[in-house]
Amino acid sequence: MRHRVSGYQLGRNAAQRKALYRNLVTQLFKHGRIETTEAKARAVRPDAEHLITVAKRGLRVGGNKVSARRYAVANLNDNDVARKLFDEIAPRYESRPGGYTRIYKLGARQGDGAPMVILELVKD
């Protein structure tokens, strides 16, 4: 039974899952939107939103900017993307209390019928 077991395994071990999440979040911040399966998008969405919240906290007066940047760099694969997170993405959502991403359903993938979605950053 799966009582109180949260999260998605996605058919991978923990290290592969962590690498997949990091790659997806990095690409989401780099391009603004990614096309992926619904399960991967639902699994990655909380990580992306948490990183934006951490970046917003680092921008506040009195916020610990150094630790927030270190956390972002540790959880992203690219230092330029971490810089973009703090310089462009976080200020854009300064007045927004949450809900920085949106999922659009596209339909089934041709090869295996997996439900595909677009995960994107909200414009405002």
Image (tube, rainbow, N blue to C red):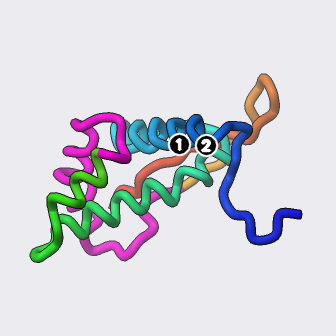
Which residue in the structure is indicated by mark 1?
Answer: 18
Q: Position of residue 111 (x, y in %)?
A: 78, 23
Whether residue 92 appears in this view of the structure is no
Classify residue 118 by image quadrant.
top right
For the point 45% across and 41% down, the residue is 22
Which residue in the structure is indicated by mark 2?
Answer: 14
For the point 17% across and 51% down, the residue is 87
Distance between the Cα atoms at labels 2 and 1?
A: 6 Å
Classify residue 98 by image quadrant.
bottom left
**What amino acid is found at the position of numbered circle 2 in the picture?**
Ala
User: Dot 1: what SS?
Assistant: helix
User: Dot 2: what SS?
Assistant: helix
**Magenta stretch: residue 14 in it?**
no
Q: Is residue 4 above or below residue 113?
A: below
Q: Is residue 112 above or below residue 50?
A: above
**What amino acid is found at the position of numbered circle 1 in the picture?**
Lys
Whether residue 64 appears in this view of the structure is yes
Mark 2 touching mark 1, by CB under 8 A?
A: yes
